[in-house]
Amino acid sequence: MSDATREAEPVVERDLSDPGLYFNRELSWLQFNARVLDLALDAEVPLLERLKFLAICSSNLDEFFMVRVAGLHDQVEAGIEKPLQDGRTPSDTLEAIRRVVREHVARQSRCLNHDLRPALAEHGIRIVRYPDVGAAERKKLDERFQRQIFPVLTPLAVGLGRPFPYISNLSLSLGVIVHDPVTDVQTFARVKVPKEMLPRFHALGDGRTFVPLEDLIAANLDALFPGMEIVDHHVFRVTRDADFTVSDEADDLLRAVEDELRARRFGEAVRVEVGAGMSSGMREQITRALEVDADDVFEIDGMLDLTDLWDIVKVPGFPELRDPPWQPVTQPRLQADEGEEPDVLAAMRKRDILVHHPYDSFVTSVERFVDQAVNDPDVLAIKQTVYRTSDDSPLVPALIRAAERGKQAVCLVEVKARFDERANIQWGRAMEEAGVHVVYGLPSLKTHAKCILVVRREGDGIRHYLHVGTGNYNAKTARLYTDFGLLTCDEELGADVADMFNFLTGFARPRGYRKALVAPMHLRDAVIAEIDRTIAVHESGRPARIRMKMNSLVDRECIQALYRASQSGVSVDLNIRGICCLKPGVPGVSDNIRVISVVGRFLEHSRIFEFQRDDDCVTFIGSADLMPRNLDTRVELLAPVRDEAIRGDLTDTLDRCFADNVNAWELDAECIWTRRTPGDGEPRSVHRELMAAHAAEAAEAASQAASQA
């Protein structure tokens, strides 16, 4: 479908709450992970990048079981069988998930065993089993086992007075059947594979041949059970419920989260992975001890826990097996003239600035913005949200320096950011000790908004300098995820963000906001109102269209609003990276809706909401996806983009995303994603195009600056 307004089909009277108009949330996520797996299977992708995608795919699936599948188990155990949005009950959904995942993990194993390992071996990178190693190398491995591995192993036998050992979440284990030739007693023992403290893959002399740690242990089980006969052994892995909920009544949020983190280790087992060929007796003993149904046991043909393939991806050298390196550039507006220091605040005073990571450098934009604010004697206060950040982030230490210099430094640390809770608690305590005002959010809400507010004294007043982003303040992910950041001195937007901070740190409830859209107050209603305004413009005979880019689309009310837009004839283009519960192409309901997903070198993470109405274009960027959790139980922030040139840059990004035919998939009404191909046309990759465009713009700006020097 073209970008021009599409002709409206006759409206079919259909209840927009009909379950047949919605895809299942969990199955849609599994389809996203299948698209990641497709990249691992793609022969056009460099070999080590394919291995990386296989590791990501495995890691994604782990989190899916720990959170989403665990939640479904909780519903089933609680007797909740109310149909979900698509009409399936929790039990129905679990059954469908198991079926899809079995096929999924079989594809993963085939990809590694039959595609990637042989292809890597052709380039000299080998992942081999212990028996396949030569005698001389086996001797060296055995010596390494005795020196480095054996001392940290603890075999745990099960028997009289010896209960089945506790097995922690995501730990890899060897199940061993041991026979005592003296007493003729046979017993089960568990040996943990200590990959948290030892390398998962042990390199041989050439540094390019690797033997899995569990193979080294299995080959030396005699050393762990002297005088016994090893009857059988197999690997297995346990996944536990790792989600938790903090009570709205929690008096001390920090302590409540710490208590839940301790409890997380003992969550219910929701998945057991076992090596193919494990005997029925061993499997039954493991599942009975872990209280897991047979339906939740997944047999793996080959290696378990492919997340550790990252260790192989990082092997030095082999540039021909990787994507060409990309070095983020300094945004042209933030480049300094020859011989001068960059001045981010001065550039912001001239005009709003848009940065697009990883094409634009996070270091020379966001980090420089904060660093300059810390060093500026006229800056009175710096306020920031932290949802996820890196261990070596300079932004949090910058807030500590600001506090030490007498500025008011405020940091809202979200301690409920899933799987980053401990890191955020540590950062929060370090900042508190340095005098930063740290707030840990509200028990009932997660603070997911991405913003930094700088308050500067200028003349006899103050000015707000503001960064509103779509992604986390994390220098590592800023090189891997596509995210936007708006640097602005907009007075009303700055006042909105100041009010939002006061709501989060104090005891206040703003009556309304001037420009910002903030959840959970009114973001859903505001987005739906923009959709309705667009419908009204189209129905008056003027051109109108809606384009949105986000990670996930789940919220029923927003989907129904988009269905109404389609029914009225409005062109709706959606770029949804992950979950999409909306069905495009349903006659009389969503004929005018197109849904694509871009999955490629960078993780598409930015959110853009664009409403084109005749000559007027209303555009927002920010932290929120259209999901109930974002709209109802999180603090989210969308900022309007007023600068015409910046809106043009966002429109250009959307254009390139919808034109991508290299790493884009298109969704149909049957919930089938079909990968686009260039065919006879020109290959279009949004990632490649934006890298080239940003490099060219930065080079031109540098050339102009040099010629004027």
Image (cartoon, rainbow, N blue to C red):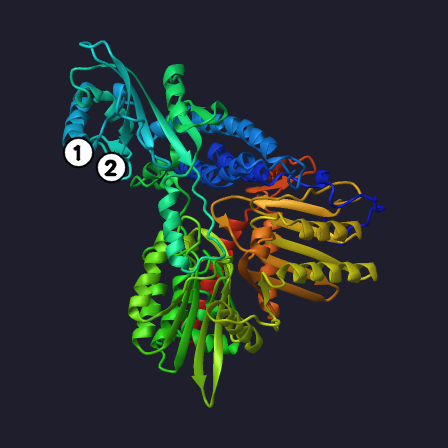
Instruction: Give above or below for 355 relative to 606.
Output: below
Q: Is residue 312 left or right of residue 471?
A: left
Which residue occupies the extreme bottom position in the image?
Answer: 460
At 56% from the left edge and 57% from the top edge, which residue is drawn? 624
Say few, some or many: other residues with alpha carbon within 10 Å of mark 1 (under 14 / 14 to 19 / 20 or more). few
Residue 61 appears anywhere in the view: yes
Position of residue 200 relative to residue 703, above or below, is above
Compare marks 1 and 2 and give the one earlier in the sequence. 1
Residue at image x 52%, y 54%? Answer: 690
Of 152 and 646, which appears nearest the observer? Answer: 152
Camera-nearest residue between 240 and 563: 240
Q: Are marks 1 and 2 in contact (CB under 8 Å)?
A: yes
In the image as oriented, which residue stretches furthest toward the front?
A: 161
Is residue 262 toward the left or the right of residue 684 in the image?
A: left
Crowding near the residue tagged with mark 2, few <14, some 14–19, many ≥20 C-alpha atoms within 10 Å? few
Q: Considering depth in this image, is 521 or 691 the residue closer to the camera? A: 521
Q: Residue furthest right?
A: 10
Whole-percent x, y for residue 317 in the image: 30, 41
Q: Amino acid at mark 2?
A: Leu
Residue 85 shows which numbered tag? none
Q: CA distance from mark 1 to mark 2?
A: 8 Å
For disc 2, the marked residue is 198
- Residue 388 rendering spot, x and y as whole percentages: 42, 55
What residue sits right under mark 1 in the picture? 148
**Residue 463 on image: x %, y %:** 48, 81
Q: Amino acid at mark 1?
A: Gln
Which quarter of the rendering shows the C terminus?
Answer: bottom left
**Vertical relation: 485 (above or below) 574:** below
Q: Secondary structure at mark 2?
A: loop
